[in-house]
Amino acid sequence: MNKWCNLIVALLIVTLMVTTNVIALSVSPNVQNEENDDEINIIFEKKDTICKYVSNRSETLTNFAKSNDIVIFVAGRNSSNGKSLFTICNNANPNTHFIENIFEIEKRWFSEINRIGITGATSTPQWYLVLVKEEIEKMLKF
């Protein structure tokens, strides 16, 4: 068996240790490398993958969320960028709702609301934010 086969088998019986900076996979001692009898260790470095566009918006987004009674956050459900920015909004204003399309907007969200904030991920098109605004206006008959 070559060492890659050993590695594949080893990955099936690993112990995952998570530290603040490193994720280390330590292979069970009964799976050994053919070249020597040492335990195989695989180290993965943890990286901060939040893009600069997300981190640069944090303070502005926090202030925006706090200045509104409700925030409608528009992004794709699988957007990492969107999830990070939504979390910032939601931490600043728990009355923040994540939507992917206008059909998810609920009229009940807007009872006793004076200021409505609409924002989204950096990849959310401006025209779609306008569409969300128009849908809310129509729903509330502005």
Image (tube, helix red, strand yellow):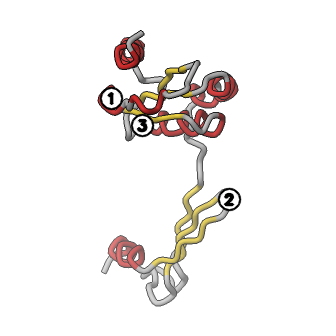
Secondary structure under the numbered disc 3 in the rendered image: loop
Q: Position of residue 108 (x, y in %)?
A: 43, 32
Q: Nearer the viewer, mark 3 or mark 2?
A: 3
Q: Please name the amino acid that badge 1 sits on.
A: Asn
Circle 1 is placed at which residue position?
Answer: 101
* Quadrant assignment, res 1: bottom left
Badge 2 crowding class, 10 Å Cα cut-off, few under 14, some 14 to 19, many 20 or more, is few
Q: Please name the amino acid that badge 2 sits on.
A: Thr
- CA–CA distance between discs 2 and 1? 36 Å
Q: How many marks?
A: 3
For the point 66% across and 35% down, which residue is it?
92
Please identify the quadrant where the C terminus is shown: top left
Circle 2 is placed at which residue position?
Answer: 20
Residue projecting furthest to the front: 112
Q: Contact, CB < 8 Å: mark 3 with mark 2?
A: no
Q: As displayed, is residue 31 above or below residue 124?
A: below
The one of 129 and 9 positioned closer to us in this rendering: 129
Mark with earlier residue (3, 2) = 2
Badge 3 crowding class, 10 Å Cα cut-off, few under 14, some 14 to 19, many 20 or more, is some
Q: Position of residue 113 (x, y in %)?
A: 55, 24
Circle 3 is placed at which residue position?
Answer: 79
Q: Position of residue 10 (x, y in %)?
A: 41, 78
